[in-house]
Amino acid sequence: MRLHRRISRRLAVTATTTLTAIAVAGTAVGVYAGTGSGAAETVAPVAAAAALPLGYGKVTVGDRTFITDSAGRSLQLRGANRGKYPGDRVSEADVKEMAAKGLNLLRLVVQWQYIEPQKGVYDQAYLDYIDRVLGYGDRHGVFVMIDMHQDVFGPYFGGHNGMPAWATRDDGLPFEKDPDGNWFNDYFQPGVQAAFDHLYEDADLRQAQVAMWQKLARTASPHPSLLGYDLFNEPMAKIKEGEDLPTASARFEQGQLADMYRRLITGIREVDRRSWIFVEPTVLVGEGVPTKLPAFDDARIAYAPHFYDTSVESGQDWDPDGGFVQRYEAAITAYAKANRLPLVVGEWGPPTARTEGNRRLVARQMEAMNRFAVGEAVWYWCKGTGGYCALDPSGAPAPGHEPAFAPYARWIGGKLTAHSFNDSSRVFSTAYTLPLTAVGTTEISLPDEVYPNGFDVAIEGLATKAWDGTKNILSVYATGIPGSRIKVTVTPR
């Protein structure tokens, strides 16, 4: 959630490049010396850099479970959200620019109200738009997670978004927008609460929701860029008399929400058996409350919580001594660990990263996500001088958002054992052990903006490498025996 969100008070708690590769005692050292940005011409074209391979599986390494390709490579995702509003539909230029900045994930925001504006009548133009966006992902090597978005149920309630008006049943109960402008409190209006209850309980609405998702899956599933479906953004439910939010959240996650997820998973699997399906907990995870969601009987389920600090969302500068990141990490990791699920943070980012505290928050969040998540999508892909925009007007990372565009290993040809980037020294390092079965190429994104004068590469272990300056991808080809360790270190020139 965005825009002054806070939990209600109801909460009871190109020049030529020279490449020198020397193999001595199992260590390869490479130097990439370019001019200008360092994005020199291709030394060895790396066709796989934009490949979107099929055959996903998963592998658990330590406490994290990674999505893998058919070669057994582990996938890490860095991306952004886009497409929530009619005025900011995703263009090919957006996806191309994301790829140029090293991102490989678009969380595409869509809404039921646009897919099916009238009961039983689907908007083919909107479905064609979604199809085009996935085509952009196919062409530019960017995965797409389709997010079925809602905020305060839908447009019936004061212009919010999500479910169509025809699917909104408020029992004639009142709705009044929060007088202080805290839109999150609109969730607790009686009409909104009733609408959520009907969505989960009424047989015709249940059937319509499944049919809508199947219609969408038929459009999306042929695309190799489709990573999967985020079933329901920031789920909410009716709160019963006498319940505090943690109690209501637990009851909802174990009952109505789990039931809805099972219906949608079953419906989607009749159309698409390849893609990942992402489930979200309630927003209380942001308050350090662990989810009570049960496990789901499907081999390709992933977990997609959001990572927002309530006080920051309400306008305060982040307090690094407040314990938010620690509480969140403790609350969020248990469910994914217990069920061996890939964890991809679907939304995160402060209303502005230009203040000192919030700048530090962004850095700390990225540091934490590198520990517990295998992917993330910052809110929001736009250009501006403030707000949630991750880019400044020129298209460079907005002040404070630089960690979201840092180097990272997008594909790891083995089991990841270490991964870090130092914002001050701009030294990137990753290490992994080679798998027993297949050996794939490790691909590392090294953005121009991080290494404007080029960089040096040192590799420990038996491996060769190639630099693709058209995509800013360093590829490492390991030649060691299974189980041996590869370490790659990149330092600025």
Image (cartoon, helix red, strand yellow):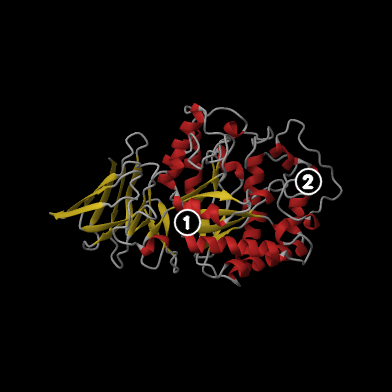
Q: Which residue is mark 2?
A: 157
Q: Which quadrant holds the C terminus?
A: top left
Q: Is residue 128 above or below residue 321?
A: below
Residues at marks 1 and 2, CA–CA distance in whole angstroms: 35 Å
Task: Give whichever of 233, 448 is nearer the camera.
Answer: 448
Say what secondary structure mark 1 lies in: loop
Mark 1: give few (<14), some (14-19) or many (20+) Cα within 10 Å.
many
Q: Is residue 392 above or below residue 136?
A: above
Residue at screen point 67% across, 49% down: 87
In the image: residue 102, left or right of residue 208:
left
Residue 407 in percent (x, y) is at 38, 46
Give the residue at the far front of this rendering. 15
The circle on residue 203 is: none
Residue at screen point 53% across, 67% down: 223
Q: Which residue is mark 1?
A: 341
In the image: residue 338, left or right of residue 174:
left
Q: Which quadrant holds the N terminus?
A: top right
In the image: residue 271, left or right of residue 196:
left
Q: Is residue 203 above or below residue 18?
A: below
Q: Amino acid at mark 2?
A: Phe
Task: Give whichever of 442, 71 is nearer the camera.
Answer: 442
How many tags in the picture?
2
Residue 308 in percent (x, y) is at 56, 39
Give the residue at the far right of this rendering. 172
Q: Amino acid at mark 1?
A: Leu
Say what secondary structure mark 2 lies in: loop
Residue 347 in percent (x, y) is at 55, 46
Residue 166 in percent (x, y) is at 80, 58
